[in-house]
Amino acid sequence: MKIESVKINELKTNPNNPRIIKDAKFVKLVKSIKEFPKMMELRPLIIDENNMILGGNMRFKALKQLEYTNIPKEWIKRANELTKDEIKRFIIADNIGFGEHDWDILANEWNSEDLVEWGLDVWNPEDFDNDSDDFDSIQGEDSGTTIALTSIKFKNYIIYVTKEEEELFQNAIDRHLADFGILTGVINQILKV
């Protein structure tokens, strides 16, 4: 009898897997697998002889979230031939992104909404919502002085800055963009100042 699928409860997550996934990324992963299940065949779960997952623990969790009870055998690849040292190396190497994205190509040739939907972190003006005309005044408790502040929203953070800090920040971004033509690396450049 030919085995066409594997029961998902026969597979085990690696308790020593050093990889984690945050809520928003996990939701994107679940959605990605739901909408594009062929990706699982192209990037299967890697398991050892004990059915412990060496590569693909987050995809496995996403499959469970999607309430899979059986998965096609093509979505699994066995790595029985690895030594213990090779297994350790694989677990780390499987999760390292050695390459970098060419942000110019991504910006010019790809739809940024698709990239975000597919899970790539891209510069998105909505993530950096800065309304420079929206200043709040706060009274300093000790000094009795009033300071005008605005907020910069970046991902889940709201950073309150003075008008002077906002101008310095904007100038640093403008200089970086003029020097390099892209915003990649702008935060590192600013932090050096």
Image (cartoon, helix red, strand yellow):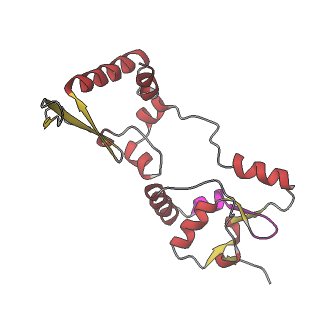
Viewed as shown, does residue 181 lie left or right of 41? left
Q: Is residue 170 above or below residue 109?
A: above
Quarter of image, res 57: bottom right
Quarter of image, res 41: bottom right
Residue 10 x, y percent position in the rendering: 70, 77
- Taking depth in this image into account, of 14 and 183 the one nearest to the observer is 14
Viewed as shown, does residue 90 lie left or right of 23? right
Q: Is residue 121 magenta?
A: no
- Taking depth in this image into account, of 83 and 141 the one nearest to the observer is 141
| Residue stretch in magenta | 38-51
Residue 91 x, y percent position in the rendering: 72, 52
Residue 101 x, y percent position in the rendering: 53, 35
Q: Is residue 42 magenta?
A: yes
Quarter of image, res 167: top left
Viewed as shown, does residue 191 lie left or right of 148? right
- Taking depth in this image into account, of 193 and 129 the one nearest to the observer is 193
Q: Residue at x 67, y 60 (%)?
A: 44
Furthest residue toward front: 142
Q: Residue at x 82, y 51 (%)?
A: 86
Q: Residue at x 62, y 41 (%)?
A: 97
